[in-house]
Image: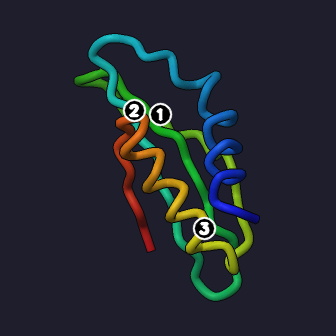
Amino acid sequence: MNTEKIKQEILRAIEPLWEKEPNTLYGLRVVLPQFDNPVGLFFEWNKIGRATISRAILTYPSDEVEAVLTAVHLLEHEKGLTVSIYK
């Protein structure tokens, strides 16, 4: 799967959750695979002073790690999302 297609899938998945409210922080968490587990993507948001809400949005096979990381990096610069990568 190419990077542009992955980027568009991520945007479609987060669009209904991303309300762009004031005093709200939005982010994307990427959980990298161990062994043959899939790559997990989570969309997170929280009002300042409140608990963070996290929703699983997409998973990709472990062989597409590089394409997913490239797509997430592009989204980080284009949309201003905070991206956290966990191993």
**Colouring used for the render:** rainbow
SS of the residue under disc 3: helix
**Residue drawn 37% across the image and 28% down it:** 46
In this view, the residue farthest toward the left is 49
Q: Amino acid at mark 2?
A: Tyr
Q: Quadrant of residue 84?
A: bottom left
Circle 2 Cα neighbour tier, 10 Å, few/some/many (<14 / 14–19 / ≥20)? many
Q: Is residue 37 above or below residue 69?
A: below
Q: Amino acid at mark 1?
A: Ile
Taking the image as shown, residue 87 lies to the left or right of residue 5, namely: left
Please identify the residue farthest to the bottom as the structure is shown: 35
Q: Which tag is nearer the camera, tag 1 or tag 3? A: 3
- Looking at the image, which residue is at 69% across and 33% down? 12
Report helix, strand or loop for mark 1. Answer: strand
Return the residue nearer the eye: 8 or 33: 8
Is 50 in front, or is 1? 1
Viewport quadrant of the C terminus? bottom left
Give the side of residue 32 with respect to residue 23, left or right: right
Identify the disc placed on residue 26. 2
Q: Is 21 drawn above or below residue 18 in the view shown?
A: above
Determine the CA span between mark 1 and mark 3. 26 Å
- Asked if the residues shown at circle 2 and circle 1 are in contact, with their CB atoms under 8 angstroms apart, the answer is no
Q: How far is disc 3 from disc 2 in space, using C-alphas? A: 22 Å
Residue bearing mark 3: 67
Which residue position holds label 1? Answer: 53
Marks 2 and 1, how far apart at CA: 10 Å
**Does any portion of residue 16 appear in the rendered image?**
yes
